[in-house]
Image: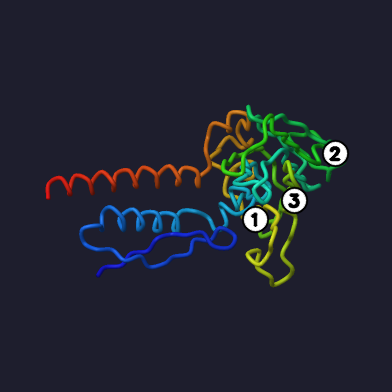
Amino acid sequence: MEKSDAARTGRHGAIALRAVPCGAARFARRCGVAATLATVAAVALPAGATAHVTVSPSEAPAGGYARLEFGVPHGCDGSPTTRIRVRIPRDVAIVKPGRNAFWTLATKQGEKTPVEVHGQRITRGPQEVIWTARTPLPDAQLDVLQMSVKLPEGAGRSVYFPTVQECERGSTAWIERPAAGQSADELEHPAPVVKLVASTGAHGGSASGNDSGHGGDANQASGKAPTWLAVVALVAGLVGTTTGVAGLRRRRA
């Protein structure tokens, strides 16, 4: 009797594995699909990608521009999401929120840590970006909200974007930061975070596939799905291919 691994979701969306019996005749139909899901998901999906509000990329060049993608994968204990509020750090002075046809967009302006950009001194900017759903986002669906930012200097630092998810019933504050020596995996509601790394290009480098040095056009970015969404599509395609091969083998047998 052969065995394969089927994926199931554990705490914080981590991929857990369990053994599933697989007879030879059912291998391609059952275990092939299970193994494909487990392998691709475990390797390609970031830990907790389906568990809480996260930001991608998780690392970006210090002092550079980055296009950040905030994933909203579920509601509040099953209740549809109505609003996402992202707090912008004081030392992130330049913020260009992305538009999304399913959400309205607003910002709250305030004092920022002064920064020189192309000879211009900037002292004010968005302190909070607020997306309000035109119709509530169901718990069973996901969406991605984006913004282009200029990150502060300081390779090795972690820049947190505390986020509040409001729902038809209740809300969840993704604002926790790990204490010294504590892992973020231990937190119940971790704040989205970007770790600053040493820059390698002009303008301090850039992230999210943008090489313009200005974070790209966040409005156009809404048409580009993050990596983990592409992985979901890949898994679906592999499942369909495996199922088709299994059917062909049965007919030939």
Q: Which residue is mark 2?
A: 123
The one nearer the camera, 26 or 112, is 26
Which percent across, then down, holds residue 216?
60, 33
Give the residue at x 31% y 67%.
3
- Report the Cα–Cα distance between label 2 and label 3: 21 Å
Locate the N terminus and report the quarter of the image it occupies.
bottom left
Residue 47 image-quadrant placement = bottom right
The amino acid pointed to by label 2 is Thr
Disc ID at residue 162: 3
Q: Which residue appears farthest toward the right when viewing the image?
A: 111
- Report the Cα–Cα distance between label 3 and label 1: 14 Å
The one nearer the camera, 164 or 226, is 164
The amino acid pointed to by label 1 is Lys
Q: Between tags 2 and 1, which lies in front?
A: 1
The amino acid pointed to by label 3 is Pro
Give the residue at x 42% y 67%.
18
